[in-house]
Amino acid sequence: MSQTILNSNQPVIKTTQLCRDFGSLKAISNLDFEVEKGQIYGFLGPNGCGKTTAIRMLTGLLLPTSGEIEILGLTLPRDAEKLRLKIGYMTQKFSLYDDLTVKENLTFIAKIYGLSRRDQAERIQELLNTYGLDQKADQLAGSMSGGQKQRLALAAATMHKPELLFLDEPTSAVDPENRRDFWEKLFDLCEQGTTILVSTHYMDEAERCHKLAILEAGVKRADGSPDELMQNMGAQVVEIESSQLRQLKQTLIALPEVITAAQLGSRLRVLVKNSCSDPLVFLAQQTALSTNAFTLVRPSLEDVFVTCTGKGRQ
Amino acid sequence: MKALYRLQAIVIKELTQLKRDRMTFGMVIMIPLIQLMLFGFAINTNIRDIPVGVVDQSQTALSRVLIQTVTATQVVQFTEHFHDIESAQAAIARGDVRAVMLIPQDVSQRLVRHKTVGLGTPPSSDEETSRPVAQWIVDGSDTMVAAAIKGLRAMPLTELLGLPANRITPTFEVALFYNPEQRTAVNIVPGLVGVILTMTMIMFTSAAIVRERERGNLEMLITTPIRSIELMLGKIIPYMLIGIVQVIIILGLGYSVFNVPINGSLLQLAGATLLFIMASLTLGLVISTIAKSQLQSMQMTIFVLLPSILLSGFMFPYEGMPIEAQYIAELLPATHFMRLIRGVVLRDVEIMDMTYDVTWLAIFTVIGLIVASMRFKKNLG
């Protein structure tokens, strides 16, 4: 542990040309990325893009087909066992025991991680308080709501105060309010120095990350902070206010300069390639509408996502 | 130290889960209870009251006395009378009766000259004079039934004529040790311990790892510092306790309901049983690391269970099987346990005198545990 603290410049996670095949399917191809200490790093991508496979390799559950993984100064898969005490992993599906109570589940995890009897009670009480489960301590885990289960899972994953936390789509079974609270907990952990890698397919969650990688079909399409990604996305966003938007959309997406167009209520959001120097004028010409109808707007992460994925889609 | 701590965590977790799983908990008690009652009462190799018919062609007082004498053996019970052989054969084919006794017209002449009656002066070696009294037509497809009726062949007929028993001195004297009354339950009940333990122990543990995999717990478990061997042992220990409870139920009921004596010492009994429980549990664990779902683990359990019932010596004597089947039987822990438990319970042997079976079970357990731990890799593929 001391090594990793001394070398603060060293990335917490570093992968080089990481690949994993399942038969002929390339689940992950040539993945390179780095996560710095104290960051929340996001994997953003649609279902089946390889997020879970990547996380499973990083936690030592899956062996890479090729490539290198270095985590907290240890090399995977060789040092997988040494890593266990330093990382926490919250699986996509609830993986604690439905037929044990909240407290029994936490006690089990505490013992597995070798907490002494005295530390156990203290740490469990602390976690129950932090994650609002103290009223539920004697309830069976299987009978709890999605949000409660997820908080219990996070409590279990952080039992041994890991330096690095992997969360695989932690909020997929949770309502928006619980999601907000959950992210507050993540930032608390982050402030205490925990590095977090989280996968998601929600744009708003991805936007909260310090840095993120957009994955599609096992390939990293882009990475950087949300702002960087928005600035460098190579397209401009124009909103058009008009009638007959469906027809207008058909006309526009046929143009090579237009990447995509999506309707938002009474507006049409159009992504125009940067190669087009003045998108407003260009669109006005194409649509024969007055320039008043067009507004240049700030790109969102969804725009970035659409810009850099689209290609591999059917 | 940490290892013991983790092991204890798994054991407590398993016991807590078991406590909440009413179905499994009920099975622990009900399986031995029901099976013991079923098999203990139902399986009986001393066959009695086989339903048979008679075709009486002589219709004399003598033939009726003959029928009564045969009935008195309790081996058969005459349920039907037929007028001719054709209708009797048809009844056998339909399964109404298992055999038919055919009493010929000249039964009294045959009887008088019969050698066991010993009235006739003509030498009994003469073909003409030593004809059997009557004939049995038997449905020979069931060998046990057939053998019971074949046992009637040399039935003494002296009583028939009110004569003093003219006993022939048997060639051999037979002294029946350990089960002089020849009650089937004495052999079946200790064997049943083996069958029930095979069933429950393998079934419970074969589902053990698979269930964690199916419910998604395994993905969490293998990211923790737990070692395979700790997990394997932690899964076995609670079921050892269950196995012991089951043995107590079976032998206790066997003693009180079926009068099966426990001649050996309880310590020897515990030793033999623990050896077998361990072997069965590790076999279950190996299955658990191979099976992909609980259904598959169940199928594999049945695959082991059937030969354990049929080849282990529980139902049919090991010695009667062809060599190839004996090799297969030797592979099954149940075969070795049948010998051990019958030895201890019925013949009061020390298990250390049965080194072969003891060693075999011990080696099976160790190898099973190693195989299971090695097969259980702490990754998903």
Image (cartoon, rainbow, N blue to C red):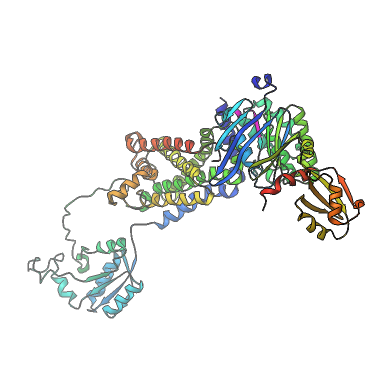
Q: Is residue B86 left or right of residue A174?
A: left
Q: Nearer the viewer, residue A91 or A146?
A: A91
Left or right? Give the position of B204 relative to A92: left
Residue B74's spot in the image, x, y percent? 31, 64
* Depth order, front residue of B290/B283: B290
Give the position of the N terminus of chain B as an image quadrant.
Answer: top right
Q: Is residue A239 left or right of residue A24?
A: right
Residue B325 is one of the magenta-drawn residues = no
Front residue of A272/A264: it is A272
Residue shown at the point (18%, 51%) measured from the top left? B172
Where in the figure is residue A31, as x and y percent of width and height? 63, 37
Comparing A125 with A219, the one in front is A219
Q: Residue furthest right?
A: A292
Q: Give the total number of marks visible in the rendering.
A: 0
* Residue A274 drawn at (x, y percent): 79, 43
- Most extreme residue toward the left is B122
Q: Residue A63 placed where, x, y %? A: 55, 37
Is B108 above or below relative to B196? below
Q: Quadrant of residue A108?
A: top right
The residue lying at 23 percent from left, 49 percent from top is B174
Instruction: Please indicate, yes or no, whether residue A100 appears anywhere in the rendered image.
Output: no
Report the quarter where the C terminus of chain B lies.
top right
Vertical side of B233 occupied by B22: above or below: below
Residue A244 seen in this snapshot:
yes
Which residues fall within the magenta stretch?
A83-88
